[in-house]
Image (spheres, rainbow, N blue to C red):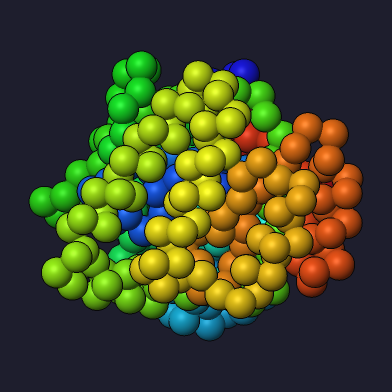
Amino acid sequence: MSEDLSPIPPGTLPLSARSPGKCIVFGEHAVVHGAPELLFALDLHTQVLVRGAARSSLNGDYEAAALHPYFRSALESPWASRATVDVRAVSRIPRGAGLGSSAALSAGLAATLSSLSGGVDRSTLAQRSFDVERGAQGVGSPGDTSAAVAGGFLTVNGEASGPVLWTVRDGPRSWEVRRVADPGWVWVVAHSGIPRATGDAVRAVGVRLARPDGPALLDQFREVATEGTRAVAAGDRATAAALMNRNQELLREVGVSHPRLEALLDAARPFAEGAKLTGAGAGGSVVVLPRPGAETELVRRLARAGGLPFVVKPAPSGVGLVDPPA
C-alpha cells in the first residue's frame, strides 16, 4: 500500500483536490475522551475545484462564506489564502452518514487554500484540516480529518508499531496519530438514510460518561479499541470481528444506536463476521466485516433492509491535488 505523505505543493488558480472519506472500526466517541480509535480512509471521495472569483461562493451559493460552517471556517482560518474563490464540491460520500463527508471537504478546502498560500507539509495539513472541522462542529477529535490527510489505516491515541505520523492539538489536549498495517480485508458500509448530527451525539455521550459508572464504561471502550487494533494489525479476523460486535454493545449502552441501524445490523448478521455502527451514530451508517464470499448477498440484504450499501477498501492515499477539469 502506498503511504504517500508528500507535502501539498504551492499552486495557483484554478486548483482541484481529491479527498477520501473515513470509516471508524473501533473507538468512536471514546476517542474524544482520550481512548484509542482505529479507522481507515474510505475509497469514496470528495473533489473540490477552486477558481478565482469576484466573490467567494460554494456550489453557487454566495451566502456560504458566511453561513456554511465548514466553508466559513476554512475561509476564516489565519493560514488561508485571502483570495476570493468559487468552490465547487462533488462527493460520492453520503452526507450525514458518519462516513467522513465533512472531513473530506475540510481536508480538500485546507489543501487547496494552503496550496494558494505557498504549500504545506502533511503534519501541518492534518492540524489545519482538524481546525476547519473543529471550527465548524465545535466538538470532535482529529481521526476523521487525519484519515482524509494520510490515507490507509490509522490509530489515534493507540498502540502501534509505527512511528507517530503527527500530533494534533486542540488547546491543552493532544492526539497522537500512527499508521497501522492494512490487513487487506474487504469491508461493507451501509448508510441508514437517517442523518446524524455529530456535535449533538458527542455532547450526549459526554453526559452519559459523566455518570458514576462512566469511567468504567470508558475503560471498556479503551480495552476493545486497543485489542481490536492489535487484531487488525495482526490480520486476526475472528478476534477483530468479535470485538466489533462487543463495541456495538458498548455503543448501545451510551445511547447512540438507532432502530434503523439495528435493522441493518440484523439484516447483515447471517453474512457478517462482525458488524457495528460507524461514526457518531443516532443515525448514519454501519460497517460490516463480511464472511468471505458473502459480499454480494450481504449488499442485497442491506439494500432490502433500506440501507445504501457500498463494498469498500481503504483508500491508500490521502488528500492530494489533481488536475482541474478542463
Q: Does 198 sit above or below residue 40?
A: below
Residue 96 picture location, percent across and down? 58, 69
Please tell me which residue lies in front, 16 or 300.
300
Please tell me which residue lies in front, 85 or 214.
214
**Can I make out residue 168 in this image?**
no
**Can I make out residue 159 in this image?**
yes
* Residue at the spot 20% in from the left edge and 44% down from the top edge: 174
Quadrant (top left, top right, bottom left, bottom right) of the N terminus = top right
Q: Does 191 sit above or below residue 17?
A: below
Q: Does 38 sit above or below residue 138?
A: above
Relative placement, left or right, of 68 versus 118 is right
Residue 264 picture location, percent across and down? 70, 64
Residue 135 picture location, percent across and down? 33, 65
Relative placement, left or right, of 247 versus 165 is right
* Residue at the spot 66% in from the left edge and 61% down from the top edge: 265
Q: Does 79 sit above or below residue 87?
A: above
The image quadrant of residue 152 is top right
Residue situated furthest left in the rendering? 172
Please tell me which residue lies in front, 307 or 138.
307
* Residue at the spot 67% in from the left edge and 29% down from the top edge: 185
> What number of labels is visible?
0
Relative placement, left or right, of 73 versus 257 is left
Relative placement, left or right, of 49 versus 27 is right
* Residue at the spot 52% in from the left edge and 46% down from the top edge: 244
The image quadrant of residue 72 is bottom left
Please tell me which residue lies in front, 269 or 50.
269
Residue 312 picture location, percent across and down? 72, 41
